[in-house]
């Protein structure tokens, strides 16, 4: 909003410094700083309000050290992240940008699902919260919305890097194609690393494959959103783990969003140029500031928990950002901490059922799942577990960034 306000005022008055709002990097930094300040200042007020309303966490007795002490700690702290993200985004971005609109829809949609889950746990005293099938329905609904927007909206386009031989110098030069609707995505570690989802429909001719590619694309979008949001939810089990693990992930996505929306750097790195997507950087900067500000209160010993309001939202937003900037295939590496946590649950449950069926006695791979509880059972302090997971997440983020250059 401020971008358009200063643009309008500049036509009438000379305002010193107003030109800064034309620069994406300035607006992104201002969004990040504002978000962090909002989270730090109002986070404490939100914690006091939640305490007053007795919106404390219901603790399952799992026999873990320090578990009982957490009883009554305010939950639904994801509200801090949401407010600290949305306010600066609306102030410093171009709110009519379709990428910003899509991300705001994503945040509000996932926070509603997570908030409903937390409401049922707190006020209806149901430890299971919202039934899993209803969460899945909500995630599928968001996938349909995001996939449809990308398929239908005329402003969501790409420009591909093409090459030709100069007739005079005989040198191969690169150039950008015209803006076009496309189901292309980026395949890391390969030269000419763009893959189109319509190629999955290989038995159709090119025209029909392009026409029906949405039948492949939208289910993939649904799967990615569901997988990442649920994985982030499972990671949120000890103080600071989900928020801390999200910081390197979101920081990396900020780099990818900025270079993908910058015609010069996308050309230099030989990656897909996505017009108008640079505004995503402002949303990500605000999102990152909100998470770090929340982590101030969520680090051990936590003064507040994010609840499903925060964890489902963080996972859903991360997934949608990756999809919008055509980098969804890097998610297994970038979100490695999330997926190891989710995989530990899948392996534990599957192995238990398998051994019980064939031996009559269910056996376990881990002492407890998700994986962070396994390490707690080994008597490793939760703050050390969180620190090590964040270090691993940082390493995975650096590996992901290397894909910009390694082909």
Image (spheres, rainbow, N blue to C red):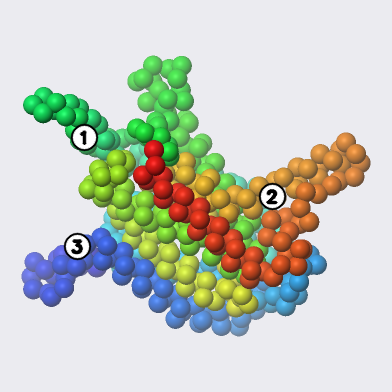
Closer to the eye: label 2 or 1: 1
* Residue 334 appearing in the image: yes
Residue at the spot 41% in from the left edge and 35% down from the top edge: 190
User: Measured from the top left, where is residue 99 in percent x and y?
Assistant: 34, 51
Q: Secondary structure at mark 1?
A: strand
Pointer 2 with pointer 1, Cβ within 8 A: no
* Residue 122 appearing in the image: no
The picture quadrant where one finds residue 185 is: top left
Of 193 and 358, the residue lying toward us: 193
Residue at the spot 48% in from the left edge and 62% down from the top edge: 247
What's the CA distance linking mark 1 and mark 3? Answer: 28 Å
Looking at marks 1 and 3 on the same chain, the residue that comes earlier in the sequence is marked by 3
Q: State the residue position of label 3.
A: 22
Looking at marks 2 and 3 on the same chain, the residue that comes earlier in the sequence is marked by 3
User: Measured from the top left, where is residue 95 in percent x and y?
Assistant: 30, 59
Q: State the residue position of label 2.
A: 344
Closer to the eye: label 1 or 3: 1
Of 284 and 135, the residue lying toward us: 284
Looking at marks 2 and 1 on the same chain, the residue that comes earlier in the sequence is marked by 1
Residue at the spot 51% in from the left edge and 72% down from the top edge: 294
Q: Secondary structure at mark 3?
A: helix
Q: Is residue 184 left or right of residue 237?
A: left
- Characterize the local packing of mark 1: few (<14), some (14-19) or many (20 or more) Cα atoms within 10 angstroms: some
Q: Secondary structure at mark 2?
A: helix
Pointer 1 with pointer 3, Cβ within 8 A: no
Q: Which mark is residue 174?
A: 1
- Characterize the local packing of mark 3: few (<14), some (14-19) or many (20 or more) Cα atoms within 10 angstroms: few
Residue at the spot 45% in from the left edge and 58% down from the top edge: 250
User: Measured from the top left, where is residue 186 in percent x and y?
Assistant: 40, 38
């Amino acid at each position: 909003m401020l971008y358009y306000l200063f643009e309008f005022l500049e036509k009438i008055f000379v305002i010193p410094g107003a030109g800064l709002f034309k620069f994406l990097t300035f607006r992104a930094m201002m969004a990040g700083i504002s978000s962090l300040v909002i989270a730090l200042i109002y986070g404490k007020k939100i914690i006091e309000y939640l305490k007053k309303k007795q919106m404390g966490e219901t603790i399952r007795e799992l026999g873990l050290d320090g578990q009982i002490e957490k009883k009554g700690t305010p939950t639904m702290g994801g509200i801090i992240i949401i407010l600290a993200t949305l306010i600066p985004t609306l102030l410093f971005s171009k709110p009519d940008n379709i990428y910003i609109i899509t991300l705001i829809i994503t945040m509000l949609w996932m926070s509603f699902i997570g908030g409903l889950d937390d409401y049922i746990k707190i006020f209806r005293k149901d430890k299971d919260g919202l039934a899993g099938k209803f969460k899945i329905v909500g995630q599928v609904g968001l996938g349909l919305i995001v996939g449809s927007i990308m398929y239908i909206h005329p402003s969501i386009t790409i420009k591909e890097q093409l090459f030709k031989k100069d007739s005079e110098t005989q040198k191969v030069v690169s150039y950008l194609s015209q803006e076009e609707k496309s189901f292309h995505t980026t395949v890391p570690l390969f030269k000419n690393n763009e893959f189109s989802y319509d190629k999955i429909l290989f038995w159709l001719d090119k025209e029909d494959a392009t026409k029906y590619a949405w039948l492949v694309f939208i289910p993939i979008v649904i799967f990615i959103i569901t997988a990442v949001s649920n994985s982030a939810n499972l990671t949120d089990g000890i103080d600071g783990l989900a928020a801390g693990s999200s910081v390197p992930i979101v920081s990396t996505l900020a780099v990818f969003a900025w270079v993908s929306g910058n015609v010069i750097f996308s050309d230099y790195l030989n990656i897909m140029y996505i017009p108008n997507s640079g505004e995503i950087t402002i949303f990500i900067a605000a999102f990152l500031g909100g998470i770090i500000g929340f982590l101030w209160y969520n680090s051990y010993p936590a003064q507040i928990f994010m609840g499903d309001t925060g964890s489902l939202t963080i996972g859903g937003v991360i997934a949608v950002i990756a999809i919008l900037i055509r980098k969804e295939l890097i998610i297994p590496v970038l979100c490695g901490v999330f997926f190891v946590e989710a995989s530990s649950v899948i392996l534990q449950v599957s192995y238990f059922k398998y051994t019980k069926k064939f031996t009559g006695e269910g056996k376990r791979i881990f002492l407890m799942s998700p994986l962070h509880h396994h390490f707690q059972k080994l008597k490793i302090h939760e703050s050390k577990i969180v620190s090590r997971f964040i270090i691993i997440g940082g390493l995975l983020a650096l590996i992901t960034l290397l894909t910009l250059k390694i082909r």
